[in-house]
Image: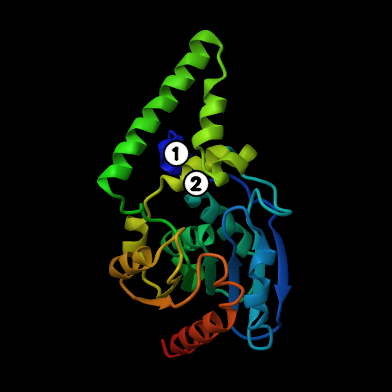
Amino acid sequence: MPESQFSQQPAHKALPSKSRWFSFRDGEQGQSLIWLHGWGMEHASLKRLAGLFSRTHKSVLYDQPGFGRTPKLPDGVGTEEYADDLARELEDIPGAPHILIGHSFGGRVAIQMAARHPSLVKGIVLIGGAGLQRRRSLKFKLRAYVLKNIGRLARFSDQLFGTRLRDAYVERFGSADYKNAGPLRPTFVRVVNEDLSQPAKSLRCPALLLYGSDDTEAPPEIGRRFENLMPIARFVEVRGFDHWDILGRGAYQCEALIRTFLEDLKDD
């Protein structure tokens, strides 16, 4: 079931104080690289790729709030708040402006960082980056509409008659990420309903967009659309990889593409 069928949470204001982000650091010289993992993951998911830069760059790999060892942010926050909190965290990290490298959900946060805190960001790399609503067939949209209304009726029945239909509905139709989100469920609902078209249009830093040709979670068409939205962007479809193995088997291909991007940035 598409996550957007669950009701979206109200927007939240920027957070008043800095959270304590858990970080893993690698490398001692060169341009600062900030690595942001995908939803449901933690910093270790990026270690193989980040490790390829340890001799030439300074890397900081984070557990984003609510994952790994970093406490979660308030219920229902979105990627704007994740970016604002990361900006406060980066105040203590030397080497600004940084290159942000985000996988999937981490790509959403990277876009918001570059849009909201441009002085901290020299460039961004999205690997299977999400943040645009998928293009769906009419059949899919009709099914989603029907299921959304079934969910509303289940919630109404629970409130009025004390039934447990909503739980059964989520178990039957909810996505794995939604069901596994636990206390992060309000944040998950808000994030998957976000459309980052406007932040993408506002970027002034260069962007490298890497998408696996076999990615069904964030398919290459999202990368092509981001390329059209962002003022300075290059899209690359990495053949033979999906949303996950692009970080494993595809690490060396990604490394080569990222290194070319970093070399180009030196000339700016």
> Who comes first in sequence, dot 1 or dot 2?
1
* Relative side of 174 to 18, left or right: left
* View extreme (top): residue: 161
Amino acid type indicated by mark 2 = Gly
Q: Vertical placement of 110 versus 77: above or below?
A: below
Q: Residue at x 62, y 47 (%)?
A: 17
Location of residue 5 (image quadrant): top left
Q: Residues within 10 Å of mark 2 (few under 14, many from 20)?
A: many
* Relative side of 245 to 5, left or right: right
- What residue is disc 1 on? 11
Query: Dot 2 lies on which element?
Result: loop
Query: Of the numbered discs in the image, which one, if any, rests on residue 59?
Result: none
Q: Vertical placement of 245 versus 116: above or below?
A: below
- Residue 6: percent from the left, percent from the top? 45, 35
The N terminus sits in image quarter: top left
* Residue 230 or residue 163, whichever sits in front: 163
- What residue is disc 2 on? 78
Q: CA distance from mark 1 to mark 2?
A: 8 Å
Using the rendered image of the protein, determine whether residue 76 is visible from the camera's viewpoint: no
Q: Vertical placement of 182 versus 233: above or below?
A: above
Query: Dot 1 lies on which element?
Result: loop
Amino acid type indicated by mark 1 = Ala
* View extreme (left): residue: 138
Q: Residue at x 52, y 34 (%)?
A: 172
Q: Residues within 10 Å of mark 1 (few under 14, many from 20)?
A: few
Contact? badges 1 and 2 (CB < 8 Å):
yes
- Residue 120: percent from the left, percent from the top? 51, 68
